[in-house]
Amino acid sequence: MEITAQHVWLMISAAMVLLMTPGLGLFYGGMTRAKAALNMIMMSFISAGIVGVVWVLWGYSMTTGDGVLGLFGNPFTSFGLQNLIGSPDLLKAGYSATFAIITVALISGAIADRAKFSAWALFVPVWITVIYCPLAYMIWGGGLMSAGGAVTAIFGQVIDFAGGAVVEISSGTAALVLAVIVGQRHGFAKDPNHRPHNIPFIMLGAAILWFGWFGFNGGAATSVEQAGLIWVNTLIAPAAAMLSWLVTEKVRHGHPTSLGAASGVVAGLVAITPSCANISPLAAVGLGLVAGVACCVFVDLKYRFGLDDSLDVVGVHLGAGLIGTLALGFIALPVNGQGGGLFYGGGVQQLVAQAAAVVITLLLSGIGTAVIGLAINKTVGFRVSHEAETAGVDLSEHAETAYAFGEMGSGFSTLSHMLTHHAAHASAVPAKSEVAAKEEAPAKEDAFA
């Protein structure tokens, strides 16, 4: 079989989506304290390593092919992808792996600054196997919510072109559950040092995510016309969401921020994900505007409810994922003059189908993540000690730091030396030194806390 333009585009799209995960690492790494930046980046990288292997061994097989009760594919049908050698489906398997990688990596932002790396490395393959693969099969691979599936026969055909339910709602729900299980960081909502330490990292990460999202949404396009609609919608929805987020910030807090701009872009990208091929550009503008305002409000609710969703995974990914998925019930374009959302005279059928997908995703990801998270927490433990959290998870989990500033340490310092130094520094010192330290501390904390 000769290679076609569509095959080339799929290869490029897969590389773009894979780049999104390191981009997410930078985005999350910049949002944490300096002493947790490497840990956040590593949580994204280890997700790529683990899921890549799982996907080849049994993950892809569980998302396609022969199904078990319409819930998941037979993990042995394409075990090791041996039966796909020489088939164009091998390229599709690689492309789909990049979706699984970034989906689980998204969850890590909810437990920043305080999670054991070993616990996360255990969580990743279990969650992908038990939660992500069944969802991908049910919606995309021929299962209950696919064309001809049992749920579809009752509620109608679900639209989830690039993963509003499979990727965004599932990861956002899992983030909510894990944040509850792991608990609040020490000093949550009180310690000013819990603010982002590197805004340029955040902006760079958001830019990489936006770039990669064109492959994320557009990789499965089957025609030039569809690809054009996807590309424009992927441009305009996050642009509109960024603007509405900044306006909302200005009204609510008095200042539009660069962090708000980056978060608005991501909120718009999340919202357009399920509908990128099924709504008009004008509707994409409206969807982005709604997502920007709503998610800006959502992220503030964590303080009201005491939920330490460290990097706003719940507010942005669950919030915008719900908005984008349910919005299709109102603004989905008719197909050949048939169906469509309520605004096109299509009736409530599409909204019912979208709501059914949302409920099933919330239940599967919520309950499944609770079981997995509690099991890990009761065995190996999900959270580092108070001392390790105070010293920084970069040191306690990886024995290195992102930055080297004199006695603050370097990536080559041993963990024992750094912890000993931290303990000694916290002990009593002469009164004159205490005064000097208090005078100097704010400047250091502002830049590198």
Image (cartoon, helix red, strand yellow):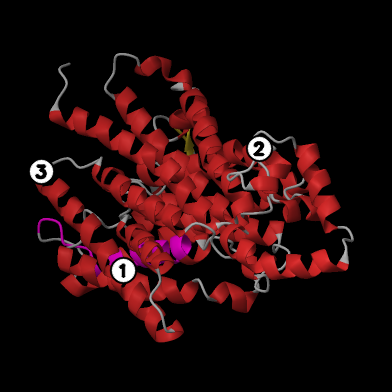
Q: How many marks?
A: 3
Image quadrant where residue 249 sits: bottom left
- Identify the magenta region: 316-336
Q: Residue at x 71, y 68 (%)?
A: 187
Q: Residue at x 17, y 32 (%)?
A: 6
User: What secondary structure is found at the residue carrying circle 2?
Assistant: helix
Q: Which residue is mark 1?
A: 241
Residue 330 among those drawn in magenta: yes
Packing grade of label 1 (10 A; few <14, some 14-19, many >=20) is: many
Q: Is residue 184 above or below residue 229?
A: below
Q: Main secondary structure of the magenta part?
A: helix
Q: Is residue 382 above or below residue 13?
A: below
Residue 335 among those drawn in magenta: yes
Q: Rounded to the nearest whole Å, what is the CA distance between mark 1 and mark 3?
A: 26 Å
153 displayed left or right of 401: left
Which of marks 3 and 1 precedes in the sequence? Answer: 3
| Front label number (1 vs 3) | 1
Q: Which residue is mark 3?
A: 224
User: What secondary structure is found at the residue carrying circle 3?
Assistant: helix
Packing grade of label 2 (10 A; few <14, some 14-19, many >=20) is: some
| Callout 1–callout 3 Cβ contact below 8 Å | no
User: What secondary structure is found at the residue carrying circle 1?
Assistant: helix
Q: Is residue 325 above or below residue 66?
A: below
Kind of residue indicated by mark 1:
Ala
Q: Rounded to the nearest whole Å, what is the CA distance between mark 2 and mark 1?
A: 35 Å
Image quarter in which the N terminus is found: top left
Q: Which mark is residue 367?
A: none
| Callout 2–callout 3 Cβ contact below 8 Å | no
Which of marks 3 and 2 precedes in the sequence? Answer: 2
